[in-house]
Amino acid sequence: MSEPPPEPRQPPDESDPLVAAYLSRRSNLVRFFAARTGSAAAAEDLAQELYLKLAGRPQAPDAENPVALIYRIATNLMLDRARGETRAAARDGAWSREARTRLGADEVAEEPAADEALASRQRLAQLVDAVAALPPQMQRAFRLHKLDGLSHAQTAQAMGLSVKSVEKHISAALKALTARLGR
């Protein structure tokens, strides 16, 4: 037998003293959460979660001090979230320790698949050959700028050329490499 569908939720009753206390102190609650979590986003999330908890519960008899009760519930929400984050960090740490390959105390780097590594090496060899086939000045300008990371001005100074000449050499090198490598 199937269970009957859940009854639709009624909008929160603002005559509920806890909901009314929450609504009147929401900005204070957000500051309360932010001060303890160090995150405005987490504070907003916790404030929303607190509202859902208060609005979704059946109305209980009046609390003696609704504000104190709200802050107690808020503190419990923060503690539950902190415990959950601690558990998640421990679980992720355990997974990391188990999923990584170790050789003694050293972690072994995960390598790409053999066919991907081979294809990458072949593309690199093609690029090295293509750069070696460039005219000497163009090759030097390309190496200084693209591989050594010098600016156009620094490359021009190192080569004893104008910046415009270096720009032309690099542009021509890129065109030649693109044409040769087909990319």
Image (spheres, grey):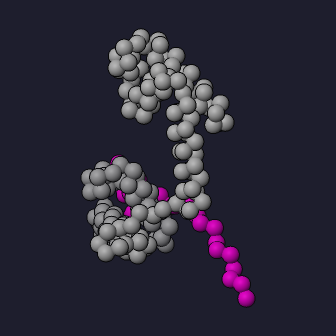
Tell me, yes or no, if residue 76 can be seen here: no
- The answer to whether residue 36 is magenta is no
Between 24 and 110, which is closer to the camera in this rendering?
110
- The quadrant in which residue 145 appears is top left
Where 153 falls versus 27 (above or below)?
above
Stretch of the chain drawn in magenta: 1-27
Q: Is residue 15 magenta?
A: yes
Decide: is 45 above or below 5: above
Question: Left or right of 19: which side holds 6?
Answer: right
Furthest-right residue in this view? 1
> What's the residue at 38%, 18% (across, down)?
159
What is the x, y in percent for residue 32?
29, 54
Q: Nearer the viewer, residue 42 or 151?
A: 151
Spot occupied by residue 13 in the image (x, y as percentages of width and height): 50, 61
Residue that appears at 42% across and 34% down = 147
Q: Residue at x 45, y 64 (%)?
A: 110
Splitting the image into 4 quarters, where does residue 151 fall?
top left
- Can you say which quadrant of the picture contains the N terminus? bottom right
Residue at the location (54% across, 21% down)?
A: 171
Q: Above or below — where is 167 with respect to 72?
A: above
Please give left or right for residue 137 compared with residue 89 in the image. right
Q: Quadrant of the C terminus?
A: top right
Query: Residue 77 at x, y = what percent?
Result: 36, 66
Residue 30 in the image, given as x and y percentages of width and height: 34, 52
